[in-house]
Amino acid sequence: MFEHYSLREAGLVVQLGHDGLPCLHSRVRDGSIIIIDVSGFHFLSLAYCECGRVGSSDVVVQLLQLGWMPATVDRPRTAVTMAALRLFHKLNLQGKLNAYDFYHSLTALTDSTGLSTQPVSYIYFILCKSAHVRLQDRYKEFFHVVRWYHHLQMAKQSSRGHNHLGIDATASGEMVVECPFVPIQGKTCLRNGMISQRRISRHFICC
């Protein structure tokens, strides 16, 4: 008879900060972290690097270096892999798949019976003090990471990384995609303010 158990229960500890190599000053955080991947949900134990190297002391940086985007910057308990985020982004644009259906598809891929316990965030569980909370999912955390990922993609496609002042210097409207039919002097219209008839015909044929 087969019994389902997580990678954490199997004794797996993922080392961060050294490309998977052992760290002399690593520290295993209390509790486990849930990794949402294209293959489903995985409960893992992480050993964070405490060497004090440049950037190694930040938990978020160590997770991002591994390709995992955490749901929060303060003691993350949930992270989504870049592969899952890219897959959802393509399915959302091409197939109009929403985050709810994508998330619960991964839930069914992990356990189609719905009997496994998937705890919510640790702080929420402490406040509620209820065993029924453990039966809830991590959909809110997943949706938060998706919104964060979409914002970073918008900043990337708008070349905000080339700004020496950083992404914080982004002004209102700088990441907006310009419509080809909106009259913009020198771009979509002539000097006299009229839209070129040739440009209108070209866009009409293409659409």
Image: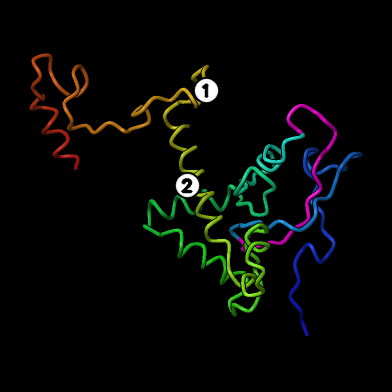
Indicate the secondary structure of the residue bearing disc 1. Answer: loop
- Badge number at residue 166: 1
Looking at marks 1 and 2 on the same chain, the residue that comes earlier in the sequence is marked by 2
Magenta stretch contains residue 50: yes
Task: Please count the marks in the image.
Answer: 2
Mark 2: few/some/many CA within 10 Å (<14, 14-19, 20+): few
Answer with left or right where residue 202 lies relative to residue 178: left
Residue 97 lies, in percent from the top left, at 40, 59
Q: Nearer the viewer, residue 117 or 22?
A: 117
Hey, what amino acid is under mark 2?
Arg
**Badge 1: few (under 14), some or many (20 or more) residues near its Cα, within 10 Å?**
few
Task: Give how far across and how far down residue 110 sits, in percent.
Answer: 62, 69
Q: Which mark is residue 140?
A: none
Q: Going 67% across and 74% down the picture, which residue do you hit?
A: 131
Which quadrant would the C terminus be assigned to in this image? top left
- Identify residue type, mark 1: Gly
Give 108 or 128, whichever is nearer the viewer.
128
Distance, label 1 to label 2, CA atoms, is: 20 Å
Q: Quadrant of the N terminus?
A: bottom right
**In the displayed image of the protein, which residue is found farthest to the top?**
191
Q: Residue at x 45, y 65 (%)?
A: 101
Q: Is 45 placed above or below 147 here? A: below
Q: Residue at x 64, y 62 (%)?
A: 127
Residue 117 occupies quadrant: bottom right
Q: Position of residue 178 (x, y in %)?
A: 27, 31
Per the image, is 172 magenta? no
Residue 151 in the image: state x and y as whole percent. Answer: 46, 39
Which is more toward the observer, 173 or 112? 173
Task: State the residue position of label 2.
Answer: 147
**Residue at 80% of width from left, 38% of height from top?**
18
Span of residues in magenta: 39-56
Residue at disc 2, secondary structure? helix
